Amino acid sequence: LEDRDRQIIHMRFVEELTQAQIGERLGVSQMHVSRLLSRTLARLREGMLTTD
């Protein structure tokens, strides 16, 4: 994952910030945070389901 994606995951699930709070910290809208989280979590799920 990219640094920003890791940072967002950390803020959401470790610091337990809301999407609005994350958006304030990053200077983006809550909706943009929602889209970023959805995309990142989908990539993580996909990676977990892929077997080599």
Image (cartoon, rainbow, N blue to C red):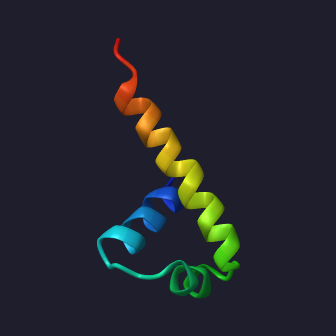
- Left or right position of 14 against 17: left
Q: Residue at x 37, y 26 (%)?
A: 49
Establish if 27 lies above or below 1. Answer: below
Establish if 27 lies above or below 50. Answer: below
Q: Residue 6 in the image: x percent, y percent?
A: 43, 58
Q: Residue 51 in the image: x percent, y percent?
A: 34, 16
Q: Residue at x 55, y 85 (%)?
A: 25
Q: Residue at x 45, y 66 (%)?
A: 7
Q: Which part of the image, by quadrant, shows the C terminus? A: top left
Establish if 49 lies above or below 34. Answer: above
Q: Quadrant of residue 32?
A: bottom right
- Left or right position of 30 against 45: right
Q: Residue at x 46, y 32 (%)?
A: 46
Q: Residue furthest top?
A: 52
Can the viewer see residue 1 in this picture? no
Quick one: 4 or 50, which is closer to the camera?
Answer: 50
- Left or right position of 42 against 34: left
- Left or right position of 21 against 6: right
Q: Residue 12 in the image: x percent, y percent?
A: 41, 72
Can the viewer see residue 16 in this picture? yes
Total number of numbered labels? 0
